[in-house]
Every structure is written in C-alpha cells, then in structure tokens.
C-alpha cells in the first residue's frame, strides 16, 4: 500500500475499514474495485493513489492487524516481570483484539490464500513472529516451574483455542473479552500445572 503523506492518514484508515467491511461481507473475490471506490467515496484514480491494487489492500489489512498484535505482545513482555502475568495479558489482548476486529481477523484467516506468494510469505512470517513470542512466554513459564513445558503442537492448540473466540465472542457480550480470556487461561493452566 502506498505510504500515506501528511493529511492522508484518515483516508488510508477509511479505505482499510471499508475494504475490511466489503471483503468480510462479499468475500475478497466478490468485491470489485468499482464497488470499493464507490463505498470509500473516491474515484478509481483517486483510490489507486492510496492503494496499488485490491490485493495490496488485503495485504495491508492483514499486516496492520499482525503488526499491532506483535507490538502489543512485545510491549507486554518488556513490561511484565513474570511469565504468568505476560501470559495473562497476552491472552486478554488476543481475545479483545478478536472481539473488536472480528471481521478483519476472519479475512486474515480465510483470505490469505488470495495474496501473492511474496505478500503471503510476509504475512506468514509476521504470524510466526507472534507465535514465537508466545513460545518464549510459555517456555519462561516452564522455566519458572509453575507449568509444564509446551511443545509446538500444544502451543498451536492454545492459540487455536484463543483465536476461535473470533467466531462467537462479542465486545458487548455477557462476559468481557478479558473475562473470556481469563476463563480460557484458567482452564489451560490447570491442565499445564506442575504437580
């Protein structure tokens, strides 16, 4: 996606938001550039000033979500003194993210295959970086002695359980996203607790 100049950030964000809504409603392949330009309120030429292609927009949506989650996880790791607190905060952040940006995350999960190999590789690398932070935190928990070591299969199961909340958790639901994350984590940690 073209870099926004001063004053263009609002337009860029509007394109990301509306693009996410249209892709979520109609599917990536079911959304045309004409429909996107009309929904954003820009002519095709003006739209192409902000994005290089429809695929570029999907890539920008995917990377903006992943970069935000990586930055938040890195901040949590830097601020939290022990692995248990890091794990709790990261689980809460992940469930809250899915509750507030459900449509966008559904796109990242289901439409990544529509990306060019180069863009897909970047998205997978960002996803792997996020999972790597989780692996480091889970390994620290085992080193601290309050939980069993977790292998790659178990780590993916943990993340899969938290990610699956995207299908049903709501920001205005009976439980807050943080409460949902706490319940999931409690269940996990009981199973991973050392004797």
Image (cartoon, rainbow, N blue to C red):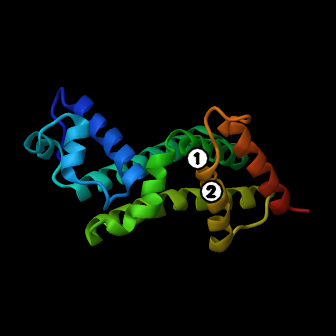
Check disc 2 and report the residue beneath it.
164
Which residue is more in the foreground, 32 or 178? 32
Q: Residue furthest left?
A: 45
Can you give x and y, in whole percent of width and height, for residue 146 in the image?
81, 55
The residue lying at 38 percent from left, 64 percent from top is 112
Check disc 1 and report the residue beneath it.
94
Badge 1: how crowded within 10 Å, few (<14), some, or many (20+)? Answer: many
Left or right of residue 115, residue 186 in this image: right
Badge 2: how crowded within 10 Å, few (<14), some, or many (20+)? Answer: few
Q: Nearer the viewer, mark 2 or mark 1?
A: 2
| The quarter of the displayed image where residue 149 is located | bottom right
* Separation of residues labelled 2 and 1 (CA atoms): 11 Å
Which residue is more in the foreground, 178 or 130? 178
Left or right of residue 82, residue 45 in this image: left
| The quarter of the displayed image where residue 116 is located | bottom left
The residue lying at 15 percent from left, 42 percent from top is 47
The residue lying at 7 percent from left, 44 percent from top is 45
Can you give x and y, in whole percent of width and height, for residue 174 in the image?
73, 34
Left or right of residue 52, residue 125 in this image: right
The residue lying at 51 percent from left, 41 percent from top is 75
Can you give x and y, in whole percent of width and height, for residue 18 in the image?
33, 40
Quarter of the figure with the C terminus? bottom right
Earlier residue among tags 2 and 1: 1
Q: Is residue 156 above or below residue 184?
A: below
Can you give x and y, in whole percent of width and height, for residue 119 in the image?
29, 64
Give the secondary structure at mark 1: helix
Q: Is residue 81 above or below residue 152?
A: above
Give the secondary structure at mark 2: helix
Question: What label does residue 45 carry, if any?
Answer: none
User: Quick check: marks 2 and 1 in contact, CB under 8 Å?
Assistant: no
């Amino acid at each position: 996606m073209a870099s926004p100049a001063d004053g263009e950030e609002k337009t860029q964000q509007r394109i990301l938001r509306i693009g996410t809504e249209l892709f979520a409603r109609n599917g990536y392949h079911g959304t045309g550039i004409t429909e996107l330009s009309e929904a954003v309120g820009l002519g095709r030429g003006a739209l192409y000033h902000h994005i290089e292609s429809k695929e570029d927009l999907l890539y920008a949506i995917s990377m903006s979500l992943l970069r935000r989650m990586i930055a938040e996880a890195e901040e949590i790791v830097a601020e939290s003194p022990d692995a248990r607190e890091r794990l709790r905060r990261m689980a809460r952040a992940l469930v809250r993210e899915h509750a507030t940006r459900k449509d966008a995350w559904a796109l990242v999960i289901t439409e990544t295959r529509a990306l060019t190999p180069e863009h897909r590789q970047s998205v997978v690398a960002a996803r792997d970086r996020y999972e790597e932070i989780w692996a480091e935190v889970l390994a620290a928990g085992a080193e601290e002695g309050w939980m069993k070591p977790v292998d790659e299969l178990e780590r993916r199961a943990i993340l899969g359980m938290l990610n699956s909340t995207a299908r049903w958790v709501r920001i205005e639901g009976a439980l807050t996203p943080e409460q949902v994350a706490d319940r999931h984590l409690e269940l996990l940690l009981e199973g991973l607790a050392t004797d």
